[in-house]
Image (cartoon, grey):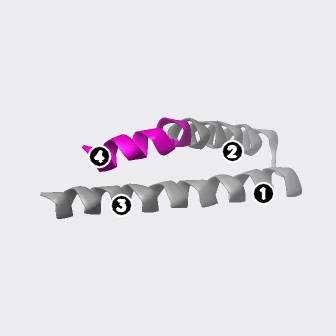
Amino acid sequence: MEERLSMSTEELNKMIAVKKMDLEECEQELHNRYYPSVVRVAMMRYISELRHQLEMFNADDLKKIENG
């Protein structure tokens, strides 16, 4: 059972890392390149969603998951 929990935590950590990298890339692209307004709005919405998801999985939540 502990192996399964550790695997879930590891997978969650990987998912969070990917989301953080994606957020950084999107923010840089949005600020460093020209995009039509409709694309900018979509990017800003996606960035907002990524931020919200990352807030949901803060360090305290990860500790709760690890400790059961």
Q: Are the residues flagged by discs 2 and 1 in contact, CB closer than 8 Å?
A: yes
- Residue closest to the eye, 10 or 24: 10
- Where residue 28 sits, quadrant-wise, is bottom right
The first of marks 2 and 3 along the sequence is 3
SS at mark 1? helix
Q: Which mark is residue 67?
A: 4
- Residue closest to the eye, 34 or 59: 59
Q: Amino acid at mark 3?
A: Glu
Q: Residue at x 53, y 60 (%)?
A: 17
- Where residue 20 sits, quadrant-wise, is bottom right
Q: Which mark is residue 29?
A: 1
**Crowding at mark 4 (Cα within 10 Å: few <14, some 14-19, many 20+):** few
Residue 17 part of the magenta-drawn span: no
Q: Amino acid at mark 1?
A: Glu
**Crowding at mark 3 (Cα within 10 Å: few <14, some 14-19, many 20+):** few
Q: Which residues are magenta?
A: 54-68
Outermost residue toward the front? 67
Q: CA distance from mark 2 to mark 4?
A: 36 Å
The first of marks 2 and 1 along the sequence is 1
Which residue corresponds to mark 3? 11
Q: CA distance from mark 3 to mark 4?
A: 16 Å
